[in-house]
Amino acid sequence: LLHLGMGMTLDSASDSDYNDNHSNSDGNGNGNDMEELLGNRHQDRNYNNRLSTNDNDNHNHNHNGNVPENKFLTGQILYNNLLVEGDDNNDEDAATAKLKNQTLYRNLVAFVRQNDAHSPRFTVGETFTFSGSCKTKDSDIKNKNINVDEGGRVGLTLKGLGLAHVKDTFVGNEVIRGVSGGQRRRVTLGEMMTFNTPLLCGDEISTGLDTASTVDILRILSYLGRLLNRVTVVSLLQPSPEAVSLFDEIILLSAGGHVIYTGPAGEAVGYFRDLGYVQPDGMDDADFLLAVASSDRNHLFRRDLVAEERENEREEDGNDDGDKKNEHEEPAKNASTTNDQPEKPHTPESFAEIFQESKDGLKIADRQQQPWKYDWSKGDIGTTAKGEPYDIESFKQKYQNSFIMSVWLNMKRSFILWTRDRTYIRASAIKNIAMGLSVGAVFFETDVNSSFFGVLFQGNLFIMLGAMTAAPENLGDRAIFYKHADSNFYPALSYVIGQALALVPQMILDVILFGTIVYWMVGFTATASGFFLYLALFFSFNFTMGQSFGVLSAIAPSKTVVQAGGAVILLFNVLFCGFIISPDVIPDYYIWLYWMVPLSWVYRALLLNEYRSDDYSEEDGDLILKSFGFTYRGEPFQREWIG
């Protein structure tokens, strides 16, 4: 059962109870019910986000979604009698337990976002397999319990969502051709259904869909909710009558986040009619409820018409049976009687108070006083839809996989995406060959020392420019990462390492194509050790700059900031690497920058690789390095500085 109001209690087995401290009101439903969250756009999204992410600000919100000063609601959030949020009485053990329970709660709730954030070059089946693998133990992955076959978990999800026939099709986006918009919305939904959770929340899942597609998805959700014994809470923007009819219960929010009704969908209109609100002809139930929850209720409040209609009904019935029928239609405490109604429309606060005193509100309050059906604090864990005990310890683990497995999954995913971007691979190859030939042709077999210095600097500058131009494109992956991180798919470090390792082949390809052409056309030292060390230094710098600009793209709010920050990084590396300004003439108050920028280290190492080779005597090498200012405490750098 779904309960909304003071505190927050969840009972997740066959029945669930929860109260949200977002409002003063309560509601209830059944363990496999599908709940619809109605209200203005700020209220329903705020509520759904809080329900799924444990936002603990506990604030009321005004009409604009802003937080007014000094308005806080307090209480506790409990899940099967385990404290998730609220007062821990400054008990250190209770505070530690609360942190563990917060992890448990995040793993028990699946949240479907409004936007479709997917890797466009991943197929539908691969997207489901990745999400299922991230929320599955290592042993289950090895046993292939989540494969796309009909008997696997992913295969069942694909079949249930009607996506089995497009499992090998790219998800796609506005640029890359893939599945249709309705199918992509199902992918967003199915991605959060490949693992077991007793509670599923959806934020405006109908965005971008027509009525038929929305109804189709809701039918699927309703079926799977009953099949898996899962509570489903969905917020919809301007739902159609067909969509509303599929919900078991409605949770109606008004300004300030007050729950003004929660109960059977078929009784909602009658409840507000009893309070003096008249549904105009031609207005469907969903629009009527949304109007009552907003300031438009002022136009619907007709106490006189409701009272007159009631009086006519009583006169027509005029007998005991009629009185009993009327009493059945108007439960004594389901809403205030017409004579008790104010002469003006209700406020959200008064709506909430009236609901607390209504039949449904009192029923919820009574249920909250009953003993827990499943008390996880005492080991009474209940069973899943298959009759198996809930694996609480598994849910308490923040990540289901080991760190090594998480790195492997992310590396495999990123590598597949790289191999499928063939246009980028071809363009990079052509670019590297063209740049290598152009630089090699300009400095072909040169014997001028300044040319060697210039070629090595230009090669590193080319690498930096490539990393800087690629950084803004990484911002598109952040929405995917945030979605995965919020659902505890994997640790952030495993994502960074996996993605970095997956890009190593591209970096090797860049270095070999560009570096090999330049090295032999310009005429550097013709030894195997010198050549491979040269390539290794170029690769290390390519990797370092890729990660440096990757950090920038991870923290910058927009592409413009990434480009501006990249320009600053580029400026400091160019100015203080030792090419434009010799190291021995850099002022003491700036010399720390010379030792800080990565380019100075790789540039110096490349020079030493050349001038400390067998092609130059020690005296000639010292003379050349001194003439260009590459000295340390008055002495030229030695080969040891390469390491």
Image (cartoon, helix red, strand yellow):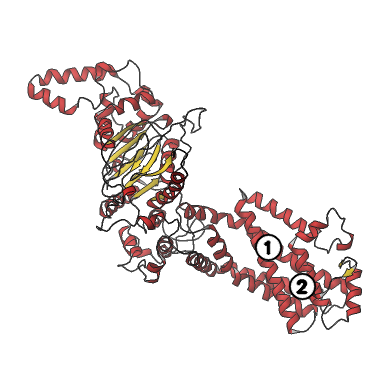
Write down the residue under mark 1.
Answer: 545
Which quarter shows the C terminus?
bottom right
Name the secondary structure under disc 2.
helix
* Relative height, residue 560 to residue 464 (above, below): above
Write down the residue under mark 2.
Answer: 642
Report whether 505 appears left or right of 258.
right
Mark 1 or 2: the one toward you? 2
Pick whichever, 498 or 208, lies toward us.
498
Q: Position of residue 36 (x, y in %)?
A: 33, 41
Q: Is residue 227 visible?
A: yes
Q: Quadrant of residue 518?
A: bottom right
Q: Disc 1, disc 2: CB below 8 Å?
A: no
Q: Position of residue 21 (x, y in %)?
A: 40, 35
Report whether 529 appears left or right of 333.
right
Compare marks 1 and 2 and give the one earlier in the sequence.
Answer: 1
Amino acid under label 2? Ile
Q: Position of residue 179 (x, y in %)?
A: 42, 59
Pick whichever, 610 or 19, lies toward us.
19
Name the secondary structure under disc 1.
helix
Q: Position of residue 415 (x, y in %)?
A: 53, 68
Q: CA distance from mark 1 to mark 2?
A: 18 Å
Report whether 551 appears left or right of 347.
right
Q: Quadrant of residue 249?
A: top left
* Relative height, residue 354 to residue 534 (above, below): above
